[in-house]
Amino acid sequence: CTKSMCAISQPMEKSTNNFTVYVDADWASNLDNRRSQTGAIGVINGMVVLWISTLQKTVALSTNEAEIMALAEATREVLAIMKGVLKL
């Protein structure tokens, strides 16, 4: 595990044969620089394969913008995982 990402290989629930990503942002949560916090969890077949918790790189001007930036970050991570899986 690193400070911003961790992979876990324990099943959370019964196998569902799908890939689900849950993403959220906490708008302007850092009181020093007003940057938002991004959080995401990726689940494949009931197993957590992606966990992200990081401060966003830029200041979001609205809750909606913070959520979109969080979704973009999670999408980049998912694409990186899928690219790695396709190489196997």
Image (spheres, grey):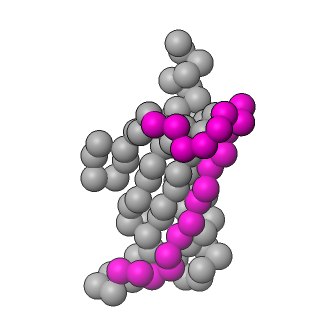
Is 2 covered by the magenta stretch? Answer: no
Left or right: 71 in relation to 27: right
* Residue at 33% across, 87% down: 31
Most extreme residue toward the bottom, as rendered? 31
| Residue 37 in view, yes or no | yes
Q: Residue 13 placed where, x, y %?
A: 60, 43
* Residue at 37% across, 44% down: 6
Is 15 covered by the magenta stretch? Answer: yes
Up-down relation of residue 39 to residue 58 (above or below): above
Q: Residue 57 placed where, x, y %?
A: 40, 64
Most extreme residue toward the right, as rendered? 17
Q: Residue 48 placed where, x, y %?
A: 51, 42
Magenta-highlighted residues: 10-30
Nearer to the camera, 67 or 49 = 49
Left or right: 71 in relation to 2: right
Q: Main secondary structure of the magenta part?
A: loop
Up-down relation of residue 69 to residue 76 (above or below): below
| Residue 59 in view, yes or no | no
Most extreme residue toward the front, as rendered? 14
Q: Residue 44 placed where, x, y %?
A: 61, 36
| Quadrant of residue 66 within the rendered picture | bottom right
